[in-house]
Amino acid sequence: MSVLIIEAFYGGSHKQLVDLLQEELEDCVLYTLPAKKWHWRARTSALYFSQHVPISEHYRILFVSSVLNLTELAALRPDLGKLKKILYFHENQLVYPVKKCQERDFQYGYNQILSCLVADVVVFNSVFNMESFLTSIGKFMKLIPDHRPRDLESIIRPKCQVIYFPIRFPDVKRYMPKHKITHLKKMLSLERSDDAAPSMALPSQQEQRGPENVLKNFTGESGLSGAVSGLGTAQQESLGSSLMQLADWNQSNSSDDSNSYQEEKKQNPTLNPCDTLGGVDDQQRPLHIVWPHRWLEAVYCGCYPLCPKDLVYPEIFPAEYLYSTPEQLSKRLQNFCKRPDIIRKHLYKGEMTPFSWAALHGKFRSLLTTEPKEDL
């Protein structure tokens, strides 16, 4: 096996990626730790893997996610330090939302910077993820009281590239109405059939505008009880489910294998994706901050996306699917309640192909290939 893949947080999108690579690429071997106790994985997994990954002369490439402290692993295992080291960022700790700067655990971000310095190639899942990390390094290092290192961004940036998170879209044509099949074949964008309820994936906004309150406003203050009732029982349940799903997500803190680090929200206040970022008011940031692959999967299966005009979303979705304020979001949803046919008949106008495994597998194959002349 020439490609050694190590995943310290084997769950969610982390698991989805490495499983896909192991299945689709030849000569891969995978070592993992369960997706629980995220902060301990970031702190101690390098030592664990240094003891449990067997020595092999066949390894040529080391692929790890940014949860692992690559610097420690390379120091503890010099044989692995000699390999072509690829570091993949699902998210970065320099801009992960915190209420106050003082609450940020410096060590997590510092470890990621060190890992970048040790890595040969640093890969991000979006331009937003890459730029937010690189441009935050200077400010982040100013937290060091004195004798600060310099020019780290200029050292790391040449190693960086963006390869979108690959999604292997299934064949769902049999679930689509006939008038949608042509669009599906053309650009991998589809909608639910006419007898299905209009579904909308919504990121979190301000606490007072949470999903449960938005739904309450529709049936009460907004005067849309009749419009919602007119959707029919199944459609009301679908709309309510779409809105309330996020509320349940935000309230769920006990899952050990959640990719969103729900357990950390109880044990470590520095990791709360709904908290402030860059001085924005509390509870105003969208749930996903660097790569919403679940959104793309939902859009592929027929959902109509309504996204904040912020963070990574403008990088992926056309302007007509973006909103700037909670008021704009509420107005759009009210219109959909009154005219559900808008969603039923809508054909997604963005692109899906660039995010598919079919389009990205060549980049990953090239990434995980060593040149014949390399002497490892």
Image (spheres, rainbow, N blue to C red):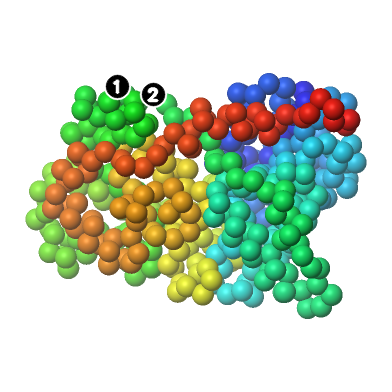
Q: Nearer the viewer, residue 297 or 84?
A: 84
Q: Is residue 61 visible?
A: yes
- Taking the spot 31% from the left edge, 66% from the top edge, the residue there is 326
Q: Secondary structure at mark 1?
A: helix
Using the image, determine if residue 150 lies above or below residue 133: below
Residue type of the residue flagged with mark 1: Arg
Residue type of the residue flagged with mark 2: Asp
Q: Indicate the position of residue 92 as horizontal and vertical percent values.
A: 62, 56
Residue 262, numbered label = none
- Taking the spot 88% from the left edge, 45% from the top edge, the residue there is 76
Residue 30 falls left or right of residue 324: right
Q: Quadrant of the N terminus?
A: top right
Number of dots carrying numbers: 2
Q: Indicate the position of residue 174 as horizontal and vertical percent values.
A: 29, 22
Using the image, determine if residue 33 lies above or below residue 371: below
Residue 369 falls left or right of residue 345: right
Residue 245 falls left or right of residue 47: left
Q: Secondary structure at mark 2?
A: loop
The answer to which quarter of the image holds residue 162 is top right
Q: Nearer the viewer, residue 105 or 94?
A: 94
Q: Indicate the position of residue 146 as horizontal and vertical percent values.
A: 81, 78
Q: Nearer the viewer, residue 349 or 340?
A: 349
- Taking the spot 12% from the left edge, 58% from the top edge, the residue there is 225
Residue 174, numbered label = 1
The answer to which quarter of the image holds residue 335 is bottom left
Q: Indicate the position of residue 334 as horizontal and vertical percent values.
A: 19, 58
Q: Which residue is mark 2?
A: 171
Residue furthest bottom in the image:
145
Q: CA distance from mark 1 to mark 2?
A: 8 Å
Q: Quadrant of the C terminus?
A: top right
Task: State if disc 2 and disc 1 touch (CB < 8 Å).
Answer: yes
